[in-house]
Amino acid sequence: MLTDWLYIGLFFVIAMLLPAAAITIAGILAPKKPNPIKNTTYECGIETVGETWIQFKVQYYIYALVFLVFDVETVFLYPWAVAFGQLTLFAVLEGILFILILVSGLIYAWRKGALQWV
Amino acid sequence: MNFLLDPVNAIANWLRTLFLGWGVPPDVASFLLSLLGAGILATGAMLWVIFLIWYERKLLGRIQDRFGPNRLGPWGVFQPIADMLKIFTKEYITPQGADKFLYNLAPVLSVASVLMMWVVVPFAVTIYGVDLNVGILYIVAVGALGELAIIMAGLSSNNKYAMLGAFRVVAQLISYEVPMVISLLVPVMLARTMSMNGLVIAQDAWYLFTAPLAALIFMITQVAEVGRAPFDLVEAESEIVAGYNIEYSGLKFGMFYVAEFLHAFTVSLIFATVFLGGWRGPSAEQMPILGFLYYAVKVAIVYFIFILLRGSLPRFRIDQMMDLNWKLLTPLSIAVLAVSAVVDKLLQSIPVFWNHLALFAANVVILWISMTILNRRFRREQTRVAGLEARPARAVQEHISA
């Protein structure tokens, strides 16, 4: 088990190093002639106005919240699915009850209009 | 001769005896072997992208009734190599006010997140990186790193278009992650394991047949996760110029490109493993090389379908995309999960064949019910729109107040 995770750790290092090495090599090969005009922010030739990190649409935040609820709850369902073979019918129905609570959350968000893109 | 049947493990064993013969301690020998294996797997995946780019461009060209790349080498196979050499000599332009660290880390992380998925993919009965007992969960978790890379790229570029593009992509990706995770639960439940190799071994009947709706939902969500047409709102040129990677140039841009192509292929690897029986086939367990061949054929078919979808479907609007996810795919996947659980549990004692048939029938019934509901909704919408067209002035009023 530990060797598995060692392998994954090694793989992560290699997976980060490979693109990093390619980018570095290209950086050495490529010309470097920066100038102030070239380095400006690209907004179709129009000069940029004000800060970039401004207030954004709240819709994204609501989707992120709904996503968070679902993702955390579905992670709890994975152990249930793995142990499915040993479960009694009652335990399966309890799992279904848990899913129904999830559905009620979805219906609530739907009714509240959180899923309406505006 | 073991070599022909199982070349990878034969070479690994030979190397291990070689290292031990040199007096290397066993722990260090296995560490070296892991390093070598991981290096070869990652490099192979990166180089494979060159072929994928050529294949996709060629096929898209044929779909659109043109030649595609056809100048360099036979059928233009050397075109991506020429492109790669060219992109190596392109200048990096870092915009003013960019957060240098995140800006440079984002392309690396986006490739790494896709490469990491290759660790748990079983290419044949004995050929895999590792056989994690939480394989599926690992794939979901590592895939989410790609979203992190995208939001990093968008935020660090100091560009409003990049940030808008990043928000859009992340909204799309996290939304489609919900039905993806739920639809992956169905095969996990049927196999009673999360290990990828365990999933393949458990598939006496392909999960494409016992969980067809889960397979369909997974396929749709994966197209969205890759960000290809019809879900390529990310690249809506007329709206947000180019999306989150607008300020990237040279190979830093190229890395996002590589990540996209590799992701599309990785997704077909996972689909073939989870729903098409992976390396399973006649006498695949005795001859791993044969299993690899079956797997390659299945993956090629799935990848072909992905490119066909890209070449033939028009782009969704963003509200349609969100509605499809939250109001159709998510409830449908939950229904499939619940019904499959109950059916499988109730019919556990009957013969396997009838169990599978019942699961398939349950899926058909769910599909029929959801199609009926959708049909009714469309009818209502049609009459509403027809009514609006009949009374234009009132309609505008109603539309504004609604």
Image (cartoon, coloured by chain):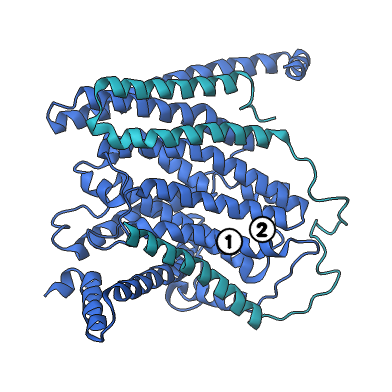
Chain colours: A cyan, B blue
Mark 2 vs 1, N-terminal side: 2
Disc 2 + disc 1, Cβ < 8 Å: yes
Front in this rendered view, residue B278 or A16 = A16
From the top left corner, tell me how far across and down residue B391 is, in percent.
73, 13
Report the amino acid beneath label 1.
Phe
For disc 1, the chain is: B
**In the rendering, at what x and y percent does residue B372 appear?**
42, 19
Secondary structure of residue under mark 1:
helix
Determine the residue located farthest toward the bottom in the rendered image. B22
Which residue lies under the disc numbered 1? B256
- Is B168 placed above or below B292 here? above
The residue that appears at 55% across and 35% down in the rendered structure is: A68
The residue that label 2 is drawn on is B245
Secondary structure, mark 2, is loop
Which chain's residue wears label 2?
Answer: B
In this rendering, is residue A82 above or below B341?
below
Label 2 Cα neighbours within 10 Å, binned few <14 / some 14-19 / many ≥20:
many
In this rendered view, identify the residue nearer to me: A117 or B69.
A117
B323 sits to left or right of B193: right
